[in-house]
Amino acid sequence: MSGPAKAIAIMAIAMLLFSGTAFAQEENKESSEGGLIESFTIIVREGLEAILIIAAIIAYLVATKHEKKVSAVYYGAGLAIIASIATALILEAVFASAEAPRETLEGATMLLAAGVMLYVTNWFLGKMEHQKWAAYIKGKVSDALSSQSVLALGAVSFLAVYREGFETVLFYKALTSGATDLTGITAGFILGIAALAVLFVLIVRIEKRLPLHIVFGATSAILFLLSVKFAGKGVHELQEAGIVSETALGVVPKISDLGIYPTAETLGIQALIIATGAALVYLHFFSKPKN
């Protein structure tokens, strides 16, 4: 199967999985099952990328006879995890103390999360091929080693992990905003952590044989679909706060689990994101010159 065909197949499977859990629930209620899958996907997608980056950096250091600098990678990753936890606490404090209406804060957070998810999808599409991923890691580590500084190598590790941690905090804040039942989200997080532990062992032992393009492709596709959902819900929250106008479209059903609301504004932003996603897939897989 060609690269473009794989991308389309992964997106189709992810869409069926994502939408199936939502349509199985009653209208206007948050789906605990959908929350579980979304929560699981977020933590696995972000955690897996962090693990892969750290494992690849360590493997590169070992291969280039710089084993003594591996500890700097672990220190950087550890500090990034602490910083991510601190970021989550700060974000909660901001929400608790802010004078702005909660709908405004939640709407802005969801729209920011949607934008970051779209960026993450684009970033990964550009590195889905093994050669591009290897070149990315080599470039990052080579730059740090050329400076002959352990601090620089630790900084590379810190930034790589903290980026994933920050995205995770942002995505979970958007996912939990307005949710009345966190059971599914909590269960998804716990299951995701367990899955990451298993994946870590697999990556260490059989990294070259693990079908990472499928794992990353499927989870990234679901993150893209989440960006569509969060965009719709974000605009809807801003409409609730009276910041964005509402142009009713009675022919469109309301499916809150998918972030679909019968207004031109919510559907318009979702159509824009879908069009952007289609353009990204085309640019990364179909516009390449044939050899």
Image: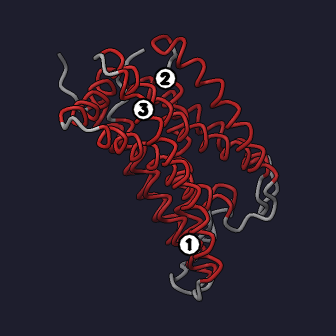
The kind of secondary structure element at disc 3 is helix
Residue 214: x and y in percent read 51, 24
Gap in angstroms between the C-alphas marked 3 and 1: 32 Å
Residue 121: x and y in percent read 42, 43
Badge 1 crowding class, 10 Å Cα cut-off, few under 14, some 14 to 19, many 20 or more, is: many
Residue 289: x and y in percent read 18, 25
Along the polypeptide, which appears first: circle 1 or circle 2? 1
- Which of the 4 image quarters holds residue 250? bottom right
Residue type beneath disc 1: Gly
Along the polypeptide, which appears first: circle 3 or circle 1? 3
Q: How many marks?
A: 3
Q: Is residue 222 left or right of residue 118?
A: right
Along the polypeptide, which appears first: circle 2 or circle 3? 3
**CB atoms of marks 2 and 3 within 8 Å:** no
Q: Which residue is mark 1?
A: 107
Residue closer to the observer: 188 or 219? 188
The kind of secondary structure element at disc 2 is helix
Q: Which residue is mark 3?
A: 53
Q: Which residue is mark 2?
A: 212
Q: Residue at x 37, y 41 (%)?
A: 154
The kind of secondary structure element at disc 1 is helix
Q: Nearer the viewer, mark 3 or mark 1?
A: 3
Q: Nearer the viewer, mark 2 or mark 3?
A: 3
Gap in angstroms between the C-alphas marked 1 and 2: 33 Å
Residue closer to the observer: 247 or 201? 201
